[in-house]
Image (cartoon, rainbow, N blue to C red):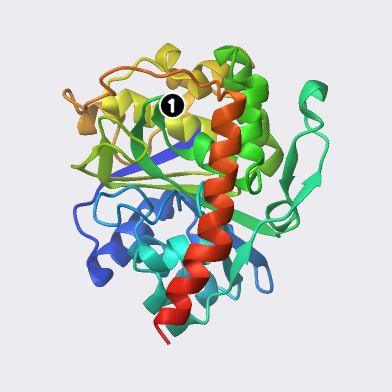
Amino acid sequence: MTIVSLIRANSYEKAVLRESIETVLAPLGGMAAIVKPGDRVLLKPNLLTGSRPTKECVTRPEIVCCVAEMVMEVGGKPFLGDSPAFGSARGVAFANGYQEIVERLSLPIVEFHGKRYPTNATEFNHLRLSKEAMEADVVINLPKVKSHVQLTVTMGVKNLFGCVPGKMKAWWHLEAGKDVNRFGEMLVETARAISPNLTIVDGIIGHEGNGPSGGEPRLLGLLAASENVFACDRALLEVLNVPPELVPTAAASLRLGVCPELAEIQFPLLKPVDLKIEDWKLPDALVPIDFGMPRVLKSTFRHLYIRFIKEPIKLYGNR
């Protein structure tokens, strides 16, 4: 049976957090069951934006720090990567407090580069995915629990859309966004292609309301871990009391048969009912997934401006 490990966790203080991550990974055999000596391990957090660093829009650096140290301790070679909506992975990471851990651990940050890879659904074979993710020995997916104005709720599956490099994400909104079912299937196929070895969800403090960046922090007090990203998301939707049919990624994963039913998931520690949240705030209103051409062009220029002008100027000014 598919295992989803759920625990209560209320602190990002390093010693406490380290113990929490060890606890949530124990039913999966611990980090040593995932990472072998010499493995190149991609740590894929949610590095959405550097514009709201206090609003829990991204995966906490404390989570990444603990996971990176655990990978190193079993002989793995971790590196950090993402493809933010605006700016570079390094720029967004540093804006959100990652600089200290990156420098202390000598943790490389890579910018993703795209390459075509075949997917299970041939209609998405023109999807460009990060070669850095596809060629890593191990992928550890580190998403944040967030409400989302286009996709209702996003966690593990949506976080892997960050493995579509650069502004290709905006072009996929243009190409597939007119059909919410097809867009959900594209996200599922992206997750299937990346096939993360482990997903650890940062649900200590989530981001509710008009996410992925316009909402507010909300203490949830939990961590989740699984080798099955689809099952992990399904379990957390049960915790949040959100029907999966309202979430395009979850609905698509069930429709395509890649996500087990809740009754088929094994919960060796806490069960979703033990962590139930009855008043999680969803977006005030959903907005269309489709990006029109003017928005795609505006988004692309904004990304290029931040990446190649704003971030370098800021870096120069700090010297």
Q: Position of residue 22 (x, y in %)?
A: 37, 61
Residue reaching furthest bottom? 319
In which image quadrant can residue 25 be found? bottom left
Three-letter amino acid code of the residue under disc 1 = Arg
| Label 1 element class | helix
Instruction: Note whether 141 is above or below 234 in the view shown.
Output: below
In which image quadrant can residue 190 be found? top right
Towards the viewer: 234 or 158: 158
Q: Position of residue 133 (x, y in %)?
A: 68, 54
Read off the residue under disc 1: 234
Towards the viewer: 266 or 260: 260
Residue at 41%, 51% in the rendered image: 49
Quadrant showing the C terminus: bottom left
Residue at 28%, 27% in the rendered image: 240
Residue at 76%, 57% in the rendered image: 135
Left or right: 13 as drawn, with respect to 36? left
